[in-house]
Image (cartoon, rainbow, N blue to C red):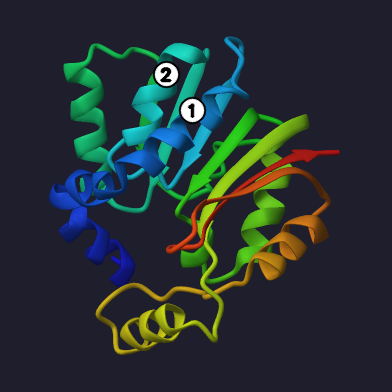
Amino acid sequence: MYKSEKFWDKSATGYDKEEMKDKEVRIKILQKIKGYLKKENNVLDYGCATGILANEIASNVDKVYGIDISSEMIRIAQNKANELHIQNVDYLHTTIFDKNYKSGDFDMILAVYMLHLLEDLPKVLERIYELLKPGGMFISVTPCLGKKSLTGIGLSLVSKIGLIPKLKTYTVSELENSIKDTGFEIFETECLHRRGQQHFIAVRKN
């Protein structure tokens, strides 16, 4: 088991409470994503955690696939889906490189609060591009704190000593350039929370 997996397993039971401290931002993310969804869509929620997003959008699409490296997050997400009698969400303890997922499988891929946690962002972006159908959408929300901000410096230090998983302190331009270098066309960006520099980015596969 990876260190980050252990961290997220331990964080799982308190995850919803912690995330909903920024309830207004979470509601805005949901509203913006729902605006792009179509009933016939197959959606991959990459880093689905406890299913906060996947369960909410299930009624708007044909199928949602929620994946996460934390088995405990997946257990909680599946239990919530069962309690809500949601039939069209599949949760799986796996990574985006799972060989069961093939080129062009998805109409949309979501990565909410994920990209700054990745060790190899370009490799993951290439995989996301591969898994999307032509014209498919990729939507992300990422804290872009930058290396020079006090918050960015503090989080980098905490992550280096192992108290939290390793994270990257991207600027908005650095993140956007990485996404564009993969071949995506960016058509919407918005800072959803100025203090946390949480940036919503919606792109399309050419």
Q: Which residue position holds label 2? A: 58
Cα–Cα gap, marks 1 and 2 = 13 Å
Residue 171 placement, left or right of 115: right
Q: Earlier in the sequence, mark 1 or mark 2?
A: 1
* Image quadrant containing the C terminus: top right
Which amino acid lies under the numbered mark 1 shown in the image of this protein?
Gln
Q: Which residue position holds label 1? A: 31
Return the x and y of residue 101 as percentages of the image width and height. 58, 37
Q: Residues within 10 Å of mark 2 (few under 14, many from 20)?
A: many
Is 154 in front, or is 133?
154
Residue 2 showing in the rendered view: no
Mark 1 or 2, closer to the camera:
1
Is 95 in front, or is 80?
80
Return the x and y of residue 176 as percentages of the image width and height. 72, 60
At 51% from the left and 65% from the top, the residue drawn is: 116
Of helix, strand and loop, which one carries label 1? helix
At 37% from the left and 24% from the top, the residue drawn is: 56
Return the x and y of residue 194 as percentages of the image width and height. 49, 59
Return the x and y of residue 61 as percentages of the image width and height. 52, 15
* Image quadrant containing the N terminus: bottom left
Q: Is residue 30 above or below residue 124?
A: above
